Image (tube, rainbow, N blue to C red):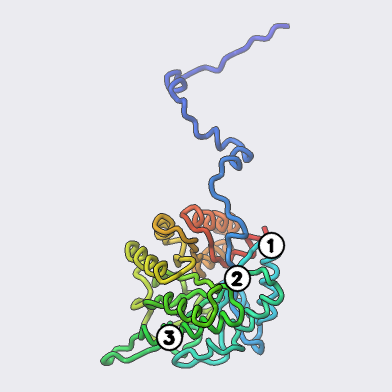
Amino acid sequence: MTTKTISPPTTDTAAQTTLTRRPRRLRRTESIRTLVRETIVRPEDLIYPLFVVPNERPRVEIKSMPGVFQNRVREAVDDARRAFDAGVRAVLLFGLPEYKDGIGSASWDPSGPVQSATEAIKRALPDMAVMADVCLCEYTDHGHCGVIVDHEGVKDVDNDQTVALLAKQAISFAAAGADFVAPSDMMDGRVGAIRRALDGRGMSDVGIMAYSAKYASGFYGPFREAAESAPQFGDRRSYQMDPANVREAVREMALDVEEGADMIMVKPALAYLDVIRAARENFDLPVAAYNVSGEYSMVKAAAERGWIDGTRVMNEILTSIKRAGADLIITYHALEFAER
Ligand SMILES: [Zn+2]
């Protein structure tokens, strides 16, 4: 039997012979795509934020953030353990205190929710890195990140009075066993003041992850429900950064590095990937990025409606943040991502 080989008709010989670069060869199969994948997000890259409430309050799921809870200490420990078992190596704690006042004095109460959770998590999981968010807004009755003063009839957050209180809060978290304190207030000079305060008390091992470029962002909406920290008047634009600025972000980061930050952070992440890249290109310290509540909630809400594939979009977002230059990603997706 004879077989006759028939060549397919060539319609465009010129195009076929000149097309020597075919990038699609590297995308042909999943194995090949895996071989050439440039960016891989690991559970160890993620920091899991936890909200801690006093023990007499119930555990409540935050309506605008499905899968995220206001935890009592024992539940915070349970969540931390689940995350640790899935490969996550750090949690970031936010506290909802029993009482609020003008200066946020509940934040340096040694039996406050963050202090209690820090002690309990370190006891249960000594190898979990515990980071404590340092700011006054969760603890003040006016919801601002600092002490309010009256400047000729205009209410303003006083920088230097606030910095002194932040240092007090940081020492209290460090004394409870926090490995890192993370000032998120955006006051001038707070990283240096916290560093000196820690060192002055023999806490030189405690690190500072500075929210260096934190923008006045609409993406924080759901967080304010979670942390019960919405400002009661005005907004935060006199201390958080203008979303339009990136050179200013580099200046802010340089100041924090100079003042002794061990890690710098960009917040939010998704609308600020260029700022993350600027951080990576300008500094050699670890760069963290905060994949904030609004970014999380938009994914959850759209997935719930069946408009997007939530898991796929989560993976894509986390990959994009790492690809932009972040070493660490603070994300409410941490547990879900790591358990997959
Ligand atoms: Zn704040």
- Image quadrant in which you'd find residue 122: bottom right
Q: Which residue is mark 3?
A: 164
Q: Earlier in the sequence, mark 3 or mark 2?
A: 2
Amino acid type, residue under disc 1 in the picture: Ala
Amino acid type, residue under disc 2 in the picture: Val
Q: Earlier in the sequence, mark 1 or mark 2?
A: 1
Amino acid type, residue under disc 3 in the picture: Ala
- State the CA–CA distance, disc 3 to disc 1: 38 Å
What is the quadrant of the N terminus in the image?
Answer: top right
Q: Residue lying farthest right?
A: 1
Crowding around mark 3 (Cα neighbors within 10 Å: few <14, some 14 to 19, many 20+) is: some
Instruction: Give coordinates of residue 234: x percent, y percent.
Output: 36, 83
Residue appearing at x 62%, y 70% in the figure: 67
Q: Is residue 133 left or right of residue 259?
A: right
- State the CA–CA distance, disc 1 to disc 2: 13 Å
Marks 1 and 3: in contact by CB < 8 Å?
Answer: no
Question: Helix or strand or loop: what does disc 2 sit on?
Answer: strand
- Image quadrant in which you'd find residue 131: bottom right
Q: Is residue 327 left or right of residue 251?
A: right
Q: Earlier in the sequence, mark 3 or mark 1?
A: 1
Residue appearing at x 45%, y 67% in the figure: 267
State whether label 2 is within 8 Å of ligand 1: no
Residue appearing at x 42%, y 61% in the figure: 272
Question: Helix or strand or loop: what does disc 3 sit on?
Answer: helix
Instruction: Give coordinates of residue 141: x percent, y percent.
Output: 47, 90
Instruction: Give coordinates of residue 130: x percent, y percent.
Output: 60, 73
Comparing 159 with 49, the one in front is 159
Marks 2 and 3: in contact by CB < 8 Å?
Answer: no
